[in-house]
Amino acid sequence: MSEHVADAGEVKRALDRLLAWPDIARSPQLAKFLSYIVERRLNGDAQTIKAYSIAVDVFGRPPDFDPQADPIVRVQARRLRGLLDQYYLGPGVDEALRIQLPIGRYVPEFTEASAVTPAQVIGQEAEPARLAPASHRPRGHITISWFVLLVLALGATAITYSLATWGPRREQQVAAAGAIQMPKLRVMEFQNLTGDPTITAAISALAIEVVTGFAPFTNVAVSLGSRSDLTAQQSQREGYELSGVVRRAPTDAGLYQVSAILTDLEANSIVWNRSFEATQQQLIGRAGIDAISMDMLLLVGNTRGPLHARAWDFLERTDASGQQNFYLCTVQFVMYRTTLSAGAAERANACIQSLPESQQNTGMVLAAKASLIAEGGLATQQTAEDYAARMQQAEALLDAAMQQAPTSFFVWEQRARLHEVTGMHDRAESEYGTALQLNPASVDATAAHARHLALIGRMSEALPLAQKAIESVPLTRIPSWFYCVPALGALRAGALDRALSQARTCARADIELGSVLALVAAQRSGDAETVARQLPRVLEVPNFRNFGIVTYLGRRIGDPVLLEEIGASLAEVGVPAQSLISAY
């Protein structure tokens, strides 16, 4: 996208639509922040938009505010960037003019959407601002003397050499140290800075709730810390520490702000931070603490989140052969679940097969094997007979997994996925419910449940869950199939351009559902050119060829109205009636 020369009226109308969006409207301080920086720029005062002025004018900080000591503006800017990303991925996807906040600056940009690429539409090239990762680089304006420039010039060769050799040296260090291990997390007591002693007990309970909430996750070692043994802990600078404070919200005396920070102790750097708002009554009540702790778990605990960034980086850059362990295999499986590609399935399977014999028959490993088989990532044949055999094998593995780990949310989730694709919708719905009761903070189970709800006709329940899952994952790691539900919702709402864009994204991982939704959106919009491109993709889907398009979709889709609409659209674009109901 390029900077757009827009008149003030056009920008103000775009601003009004943003401020009316519920996700921004429910946060008065972010709404005020956005209005402030946009109005300053429109008034020709862009040079005055600094961290200090925002802190004092928007967030009520005193005149002696120190931007280096208090990160309020940086934190809220990241939240605002994240919300802007979400708006233009969702309800604002058709906006011609977009208000954006560049990374590292507070002066907004007004851009036109004509140059948006499909990758940008799903946030593939954007910073994962919703998770507010802290930068390792200092920000702000620096006056560079000629002497400093000379030093930089002399050091250029050394820097270039270091950058060129960092990757190999880093891989050698990792290899020398052994495989990456499960991250350790210490959750500290949150500090009460409100001056209100009535909420102290609730704040103390927050850390305990977070530690308890991590119990279903088998890929993080969690412990509860306290301020009393802080001196002893200073010598144990390994793993991560989750800490935070509770204070009165600067823009609303009736609200409290819970600010959480995740610190990488080895690197001595903040890797994530987030603020949550609640009333006094919400903090005192059990439900409020539960909700805040669950939000933290969704953002920090999920396997695509900041605790596992090192493992992701390692597996994306390096062949882990010979260094596999149970933890790395869990991350490898989630990486497979991101794309559902054959290559990712092979890597996940290779990792699982390399585990020692003692782990091969554990519940999670058996369930992962079952899903790899059922979802076809390892299949070499796609006939109806092969499909039936795969489903039987997967069912047998899941029965064994259930015997080994009857209270594993992961096992219940894989069982639900199998019964979803085989048309056993009542069982699938019950199993998704069990998985989320065992671990409400499972992002993948939340997204999969949302998809199932949408396909059985419960769209009003599906959309909030799908959005919740999308918001819980860094933008660069959002699985493409997370967008299947928004695509279906946009199709229902008649937002055909958005439906087509999101359906194409969905199809990158879920070719069956995504390709059909894209074709239906194109057909309804009268886009003959897109129909002509999309139709061959639908006809070449292996399961459609083996069973017939509507016949196969009838297993996955439990909503007869949706299935009938799809059949009618396919017939309208010229798919032969026989191909809809039988193999071709």
Image (tube, helix red, strand yellow):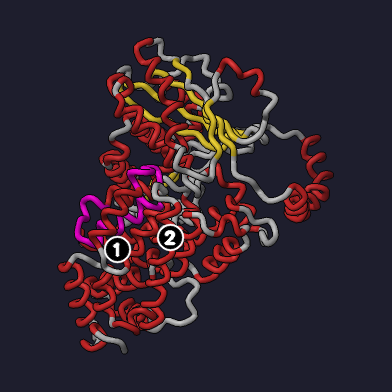
How would you classify the magenta stretch by its main secondary structure? helix
Count neighbours of disc 2 (C-alpha within 10 A) and say few if under 14, some if 14 to 19, many if 20 or more. Answer: some
Whole-percent x, y for residue 20 in the image: 26, 40
Residue at 57% across, 15% down: 228
Residue at 34% across, 46% down: 436
The magenta segment is 436-462
Q: Residue 499: which numbered mark, if any? A: 1
| Amino acid at the residue labelled 2 | Ala
Secondary structure beneath disc 1?
A: helix
Q: Which quadrant would residue 17 be assigned to in this image?
A: top left
Taking the magenta stretch, the answer to whether it contains residue 445 is yes
Asked if residue 134 is positioned above or below residue 399 in the image, the reply reads above
Residue at 55% across, 70% down: 343
Q: Which quadrant would residue 384 be assigned to in this image?
A: bottom left
Asked if residue 492 is positioned above or below residue 376 in the image, the reply reads above
| Amino acid at the residue labelled 1 | Ala
Q: Residue 25, can we see it?
A: yes
Taking the magenta stretch, the answer to whether it contains residue 60 is no
Q: Residue 400: which numbered mark, if any? A: 2
Count neighbours of disc 1 (C-alpha within 10 A) and say few if under 14, some if 14 to 19, many if 20 or more. Answer: many
Secondary structure beneath disc 2?
A: helix
Q: Which quadrant would residue 482 be assigned to in this image?
A: bottom left
Q: Viewed as shown, does residue 72 lie left or right of 471? A: right
Q: Viewed as shown, does residue 477 lie left or right of 457? A: right
The residue nearer to you, when weighing 126 against 424, is 424
Quadrant in the picture for the C terminus: bottom left
Q: Viewed as shown, does residue 228 lie left or right of 559? A: right
Q: Viewed as shown, does residue 574 lie left or right of 274? A: left
Q: CA distance from mark 2 to mark 1?
A: 40 Å
Whole-percent x, y for residue 255 in the image: 32, 21
Whole-percent x, y for residue 106 in the image: 48, 36
Asked if residue 45 is positioned above or below residue 458 in the image, the reply reads above
